[in-house]
Image (spheres, rainbow, N blue to C red):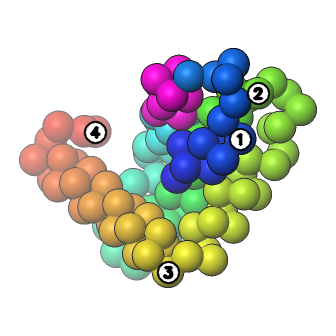
Amino acid sequence: MTLILLLIELDSSRSLPRMFFQSVLGAALGGAVVAPLFGLNGVMGWISGLFGICLATIIGSALAAVFLGGLEVLAFAPLLVMAFVFQDPVALIVWLSFAASIHLLVKRWRMVGRLS
């Protein structure tokens, strides 16, 4: 979703592969920071997973914005991405589906002993 918002501001100095790479890098780093919040048991596990996906989205979009536009856009990217997610029902469903999938996958990995 960060990529979609950043494409709006696409100009001739930024190429699509560069934007894609930096958006993926921001998302990966954001996810790595909050990875321990996923896959926990019970209701509190789902709540921590929801908190984790919100935090990963905010961190990932901020990092992607910094990689692409510098520090002056740091505050705007997370606000735009979260507004986009919560204003568009399809985007919200896709975002929540990814969040649930990640949570269940990590939970499964924890059960079989791949993660500590």
Upstream in sequence: badge 4 or badge 3: 3
Q: Of helix, strand and loop, which one carries label 1?
A: loop
- Residue shown at 51% from the left, 28% from the top: 16
Question: Which disc is residue 116 wearing?
Answer: 4
Spatial separation of the CA atoms under disc 4 and disc 2:
37 Å
Q: Residues within 10 Å of mark 4 (few under 14, many from 20)?
A: few
- What residue is disc 3 on? 89
Q: Position of residue 77 (x, y in %)?
A: 73, 47
Question: Which disc is residue 9 wearing?
Answer: 1
Residue 27 in the image: above or below residue 12: below
Evaluate whether residue 100 shows in this view: yes
Question: Which disc is residue 69 wearing?
Answer: 2
Three-letter code for the amino acid on which mark 3 is drawn: Pro
Q: Position of residue 107 (x, y in %)?
A: 24, 57
Indicate the quadrant where residue 84 lies.
bottom right
Spatial separation of the CA atoms under disc 4 and disc 3:
35 Å
Q: Of helix, strand and loop, which one carries label 3?
A: helix
Question: Where is the C terminus found, in terms of image quarters?
Answer: top left
Residue 8 in the image: above or below residue 49: above
Closer to the eye: label 4 or 1: 1
Closer to the eye: label 1 or 2: 1
Q: Nearer the viewer, residue 111 or 76?
A: 76
